[in-house]
Image (cartoon, rainbow, N blue to C red):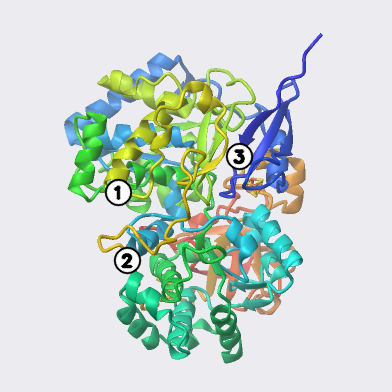
Amino acid sequence: MTRAAPTICTTCPYCGVGCGVLASPDGAGGMEIRGDKAHPANAGKLCSKGSALGETVDLEGRLLAPVVKGQETEWDAALDLVAEKFRTSIAEHGPDSVAFYVSGQLLTEDYYVANKLMKGFIGSGNIDTNSRLCMASSVAGHKRAFGTDTVPGQYEDFDEADVIVLVGSNLAWCHPVLYQRIAAAKKARPEMRVVVVDPRRTATCDIADLHLAVAPGADAALFNALLAEIAARGAVDRAYVAAHVSGFEDALVAAQASDPSATGLSAADLAEFTRLWIGSERVVTIYSQGVNQSSSGTDKVNAIINCHLAMGRIGKPGAGPFSVTGQPNAMGGREVGGLANMLACHLDIENADHRDAVQGFWVSPAMAPGPGLKAVDMFRAVEEGRIKALWIICTNPAVSMPEADRVRDAIAGCDFVVVSDITADTDTAKLADVILPATGWGEKDGTVTNSERCISRQRPVLPAPGQARHDWKIICDIAAKMGWAEEFAYDGPAAIFREYAALSEVAGRLGRDFDISDYKTISDAEYEALAPFRWPQGPMKKGGRFFADGGFFTPDRKGRMLPITPRAPKTALSPQTPFRFNTGRVRDHWHTMTRTAKSPRLSLHMAEPYLEIHPADALRLGLRAAGLAEVSNANGRAVLRVLESSRMQPGSVFAPMHWTGQAASDGRIDALVAAHVDPVSGQPESKGCAVQIAPY
Ligand code: SF4
């Protein structure tokens, strides 16, 4: 007689909402999925992607053994080769000749040991992550305004707000459970107002009282116009600004010099937006990739935060700026220093005291002297031969990086490339010298942090298949082979969690926001049973919300307003490339579809890559509805199915980011995206390149 397997509480591996999932193995390699009613992020709800998780865990296409130069091999031989290549490169060319490119899909424990190995033992800052493409501008904006990368709000604020402004966020498709939460709050309190700021009329506009079809890239001009109006109407909270804010006057002068007509909005729409914003105490501004993925993304973030600081609408229930993250663990990666320009626990890599503190804690031999290469620069260094050994962990940059053809060629030309992944034949894995089999969702064991700083466990539901190993274990195995066995001798993820919780105590003493040191002595059993908790208010740390007392993490404890001068997208339109090309997600697929494509019902929503274009533009170009269009520029080309839609503005087109080469169409659209980056955050402008379009 077989006994029913227990139900496991775990966390969805897709978007940054971080929904709790109950997974019941069916005994045949699959599982039943339900939402976890006890999880604070979703209270039992799941979107289409989360509820289809059970359909994505089969082993078809899985990488089940290490592969060296196309041949399956033993772990020991593969690890020896990787360690030797990295050691040799470091010895001959220095620590900056190697790099890790990692992922917001990694668990925090994986991220922590990768960061420790590169920054503390190899002695280079060259570890960056695909989260650079997702929310690096929010990180930079937070640090400029608050002194630390602190997300001030929490999801309850969405229930309590009187006005919710969604900027550059198709929440209905990209964070569906949060969208449903706002829709439910609006239904319960019909007086709540929702404003959507987006060049496209997306599905999120279905709950909007006001849709501002802002000109592409003009978000900073919009929030500058708002700040100028806040001042003109005498709505500045003068007492709050005097006590808690620096930089007000300079920010206001820049806002007043900014041209509101750059928004492309009517005076009536601008006036209604201003009326709603100023007239409501409780305003939450939720923003996402439409703000971040820009060559002026950090300025856009600060233009938003400026308005909240000017009216003291931060650190209070139902009020504040709120960055929603795209990936399941973008936040956890930030907490343990997964970006090239950060140290673990929100410490600053540019700060010698912080570097010394971390090195002292790790007792490490070779601390990175400063920031490493951010994603776009990292692949340029690969192209130029400056990076001799590259390890790509849990991501597919040959498809997802801007100028993807160039990145693919750079990886192909690199002296030595390691890929660890769950899938055997991604576009990137095909280019690797060594491919290492990793565990995937449903097998992995560790923690993730969602957009509201809630740390949740991802627990194994199924055994690791074949010879797959956890990412943290692979990284520690390599570290051991490179001579640091003792420093990376963890017996499980709980030991890693304890270590970075202890490091966060050091960070707390240095005035950083990320402090989970109450967990530094957590036992293995307590870690196994760990309930979701939001830092810093976990079960052991009952506190208020960030910035409730007006105290920020800057040296003078004041929130900084910055003077913002709006900038247009870096790529100008031209007669040859007259269309603004916007990219993003669809509702039912995730990243490069290595998992979601396994579910037939997820593929029903959008079966193939498409080009969303205004009917007038389609007519003028001679495109047929449901025909094919070739989209191109100097960087590359894609062939996409034509989807006519009056939700688009004339002159702007949209294509989803998920697809790679297909039979009839070729949806590898990041080949077209220019690698222009924000000068502060290094985040690429994934929504602002220029293309030409022709019938195919
Ligand atoms: Fe998963 Fe995001 Fe959907 Fe929640 S909203 S089930 S985290 S994809």
Category of crowding for the residue at label 2, using alpha-carbon neighbours closer than 10 angstroms: few (below 14), some (14–19), many (at least 20): many
Residue underneath mark 2 = 558
Specify the amino acid type for callout 3: Thr
Under tag 2, what secondary structure? loop
Q: Is residue 230 above or below residue 73?
A: below
Residue underneath mark 1 = 373
Q: Residue 537: x percent and y percent?
A: 49, 46
Q: Quadrant of residue 109?
A: top left
Specify the amino acid type for callout 2: Lys
Query: Residue lying farthest right?
Result: 1
Separation of marks 3 and 2 at Cα, in angstroms: 45 Å
Left or right: 458, with 641 as reference point: left
Separation of marks 2 and 1 at Cα, in angstroms: 30 Å
Residue underneath mark 3 = 594
**Disc nearer the start of the sequence (2/1):** 1
Left or right: 44, with 537 as reference point: right
**Disc nearer the start of the sequence (3/2):** 2
Q: Residue 107: x percent and y percent?
A: 49, 36
